[in-house]
Image (cartoon, helix red, strand yellow):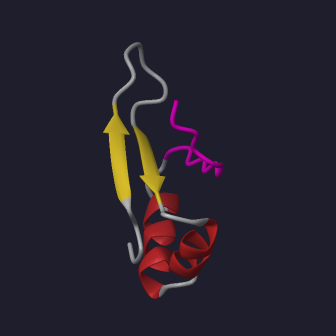
Amino acid sequence: MPGLGSFQLSHPQGGTPYLIAELFWPSEDAFKASAATPEMAETRKHAEGCGTTFTAYTGEVAEL
């Protein structure tokens, strides 16, 4: 995905959800620019066709 800074994957124990993917962009503007690309449109299309619930959340990350 264009502009993606980093990502993390986790498999929570105990069932649902099966996989959590955390994707990080360096700024909101970088995310918005990435969201408008053909690569991101293809990613959304693929995720919607996986036959499972797909939920996306956005927010700022605070390092403590």
- Residue plotted at (47% across, 75% down): 40
- Residue plotted at (39% across, 23% down): 12
Looking at the figure, which quarter contains the N terminus?
bottom left
Q: Which residues are magenta?
A: 52-64
Residue 20 place in picture, x, y as percent: 43, 38
- Residue plotted at (54% across, 74% down): 30
Q: Residue furthest top?
A: 14
Question: Between residues 44 and 1, which one lies in front from this camera angle?
Answer: 1
Quadrant in the picture for residue 4: bottom left
Residue 25 place in picture, x, y as percent: 48, 62
- Residue plotted at (39% across, 36% down): 19
Residue 8 highlighted magenta (yes or no): no
Residue 44 place in picture, x, y as percent: 51, 68
Quadrant in the picture for residue 32: bottom right
Question: Between residues 1 and 46, which one lies in front from this camera angle?
Answer: 1
- SS majority, magenta: loop
